[in-house]
Amino acid sequence: MYAQMVETGLKNVRTAADMGDEERAFQDRIDAGIKIEAKDWMPEAYRKTLIRQISQHAHSEIVGQLPEGNWVTRAPTLKRKSILLAKIQDEAGHGLYLYSAAETLGVSRDELLAALHSGKAKYSSIFNYPTLSWADMGAIGWLVDGSAIINQIPLCRCSYGPYARAMIRVCKEESFHARQGYDIMMSLAKGTPEQKAMAQDALNRWWWPSLMMFGPSDAESVNSAQSTQWRIKLFSNDELRQRMVDQTVPQAEYLGLTIPDPDLKFNEATGHYEFGEIDWSEFHNVLKGNGPCNRERLRTRVKAWEDGQWFRDALVAHADKHVKTKAAA
Amino acid sequence: MSKEWPLWEVFIRSQHGLAHKHVGSLHAPDAEMAINNARDVYTRRNEGVSIWVVRAADIVASSPADKGALFEPANSKVYRHPTFFPMPEEVKNL
């Protein structure tokens, strides 16, 4: 998802026998559905895993602005341009809420950004794909933000209070993103044959990377099992992916577009869609840094940070000057 | 890396005349920028008509360890709630 394959640093899921009194009390509170707050006692592994998960999520929001930034100056109408700008501004806000939540765990935002810029921290694989046509703005809102919502709604109930509260704000705004995307797809699908072909092409390119966003099947993963016990992961990757497919296929049918999967079929008995094998070698390759846009995204992000340095410094100089004048008066 | 900007907590009063409510936090070099940033981040959808920003470092908070001492005494004083006193059906306006 926006946070993929988050390490817990543990080799086995913690059992009651492994735990001291404090950790047992902590796990009991989680089991009872009580939120853990910033100043409460928590195991070091829980704190570190949350920092990794929340910061990866925050980085994804920030890097996620870049593929869309590509189309601000090329949006087909002024209204579409304003809407796209509003969406991108929301993503910056989501990044801020999430960095703030991570900061309650005793890490600073500048440290987290430094980890992103050095390439040490990860962000979602999905943002390493190029946005080649205007229809990609539609496909991203519909499929990528749609997938994000499926992942984030359960996180509103996660065990860590500041993260859960940030997710509530994010989810409220995210519905606008998904709808504006589908609205673009509807316009194109109802347009000229060329426009409809553009929408189909975008769906063809974004479908599989969107399914990969949920991460590999986690049945065998210690990390996932431990994160589930801590209630910072509430459903398995496969469950969430299935939910995405089930809700998206009928939406594609309404548009008159074809999901690029010859194996896709509805199973009457289970009430779910069955879908083809995901190319996991592509996913792992993108995570390793070899996706179509990994290097460009990071380069653009670092350049924006460095180009803004003089301005941030000027704001600090201005603030310092006023503190001094006030002290002198 | 240059100096990190201090953290500010943001409080917004909604349209309906209720008290300012904590909505989140942000970084800013000074109070004026904190207000500007709070406006950009927390009031883009008409969420409020007034903003307070307070440096996070200036907030004094109760400690989780004091929870018992601070809040348990209230548990045994249910008579502070009006529902503690059952009123007869035929008595009105109470």
Image (tube, helix red, strand yellow):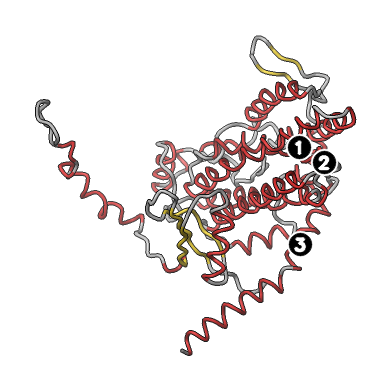
Name the kind of residue labelled 3 in the image. Val
Compared across the picture, whether B32 is left or right of A21 comes to right
The answer to whether dots 2 and 1 both sit on one chain is yes
Give the residue pinned by disc 2.
A134
Give the residue pinned by disc 3.
A302
Q: Residue furthest top?
A: A269
Whole-number angstrom distance, CA of label 3 to CA of label 2: 26 Å
> Residue visible at 82% across and 25% down?
A260
Give the residue pinned by disc 1.
A138
Are the two marked residues, 1 and 3, in contact with CB atoms closer than 8 angstroms? no
Label 2 crowd (10 A; few <14 / some 14-19 / many >=20): many
* In the foreground, A298 or A231: A298
Which quarter shows the N terminus of chain A?
top right
Label 3 crowd (10 A; few <14 / some 14-19 / many >=20): some
Compared across the picture, whether B79 is left or right of A107 comes to left
Residue B56, position as x, y percentages in the image = 46, 65
> Residue visible at 57% across and 77% down?
A319
Whole-number angstrom distance, CA of label 2 to CA of label 1: 7 Å
The subunit letter for the residue under badge 3 reads A
